[in-house]
Image (spheres, rainbow, N blue to C red):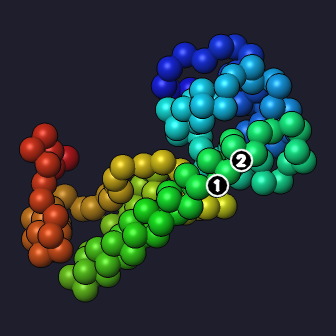
């Protein structure tokens, strides 16, 4: 897990839960606030919510279940807006004869996750042909995008 270091029993609890096994709340030995913070820090909110939806009670606090559900609703709205924008960009590129390959997080989210919003991501990676870079920049510019300062274009 990428964020803060979790206690070994918590890491094992997350692994068990994410593997789809029944995992009682008591395994985590955390406060609800600490658990929710760990889910957010590690980008696991959506996946944990998905697993808990199919699990019997297991002593899970209602406040944890409700907070996870609220966070997933918010992530879903953001995900739908991103999806809508991605479709618009891909349509604009296709109109110019450019057909990029969608890579990494977005591709995984839409191919492996029940709810694509459960796969945290901040951008969408597109693979394009080198000879289309300038054309893609023009299309993206017309769509309101600007290259980040640190972007070298590769």
Comparing 21 with 57, the one in front is 57
Location of residue 43 in the rendering, given as x and y in whole percent from the top left corner: 53, 39
**Which quadrant of the figure has residue 31?**
top right
Q: Are marks 2 and 1 in contact (CB under 8 Å)?
A: yes
At a point 75% along the width and 45% down the height, the residue shown is: 62
Whether residue 59 can be seen here: yes
Residue located beneath label 1 in the image: 69
Dot 1: element: helix
The residue drawn where x is 25% and y is 80% is 92
Q: In this rendering, would 32 be left or right of 28?
A: left
Q: Which mark is on residue 135?
A: none
The residue carrying mark 2 is: 65
Q: Position of residue 101 (x, y in %)?
A: 39, 63
Q: Quadrant of the N terminus?
A: top right
Drawn side of residue 103 relative to residue 34, left or right: left
Would you say 124 lies left or right of 114 here? left
Q: Is residue 86 above or below residue 49?
A: below
Q: Is residue 118 visible?
A: no
Q: Position of residue 44 (x, y in %)?
A: 59, 40
The answer to which quarter of the image holds residue 94 is bottom left
């Amino acid at each position: 897990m990428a964020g803060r270091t979790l206690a070994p029993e918590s890491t094992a609890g997350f692994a068990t839960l994410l593997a789809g096994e029944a995992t009682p709340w008591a395994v985590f030995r955390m406060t609800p606030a600490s658990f929710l913070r760990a889910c957010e820090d590690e980008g696991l909110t959506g996946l944990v919510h998905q697993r808990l939806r199919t699990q019997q009670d297991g002593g899970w606090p209602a406040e944890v279940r409700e907070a996870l559900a609220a966070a997933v609703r918010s992530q879903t709205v953001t995900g739908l807006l991103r999806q809508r924008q991605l479709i618009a960009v891909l349509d604009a590129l296709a109109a110019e004869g450019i057909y990029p390959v969608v890579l990494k997080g977005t591709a995984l989210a839409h191919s492996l996750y029940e709810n694509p919003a459960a796969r945290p991501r901040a951008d969408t990676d597109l693979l394009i042909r080198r000879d289309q870079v300038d054309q893609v920049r023009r299309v993206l510019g017309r769509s309101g995008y600007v290259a980040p300062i640190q972007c070298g274009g590769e």
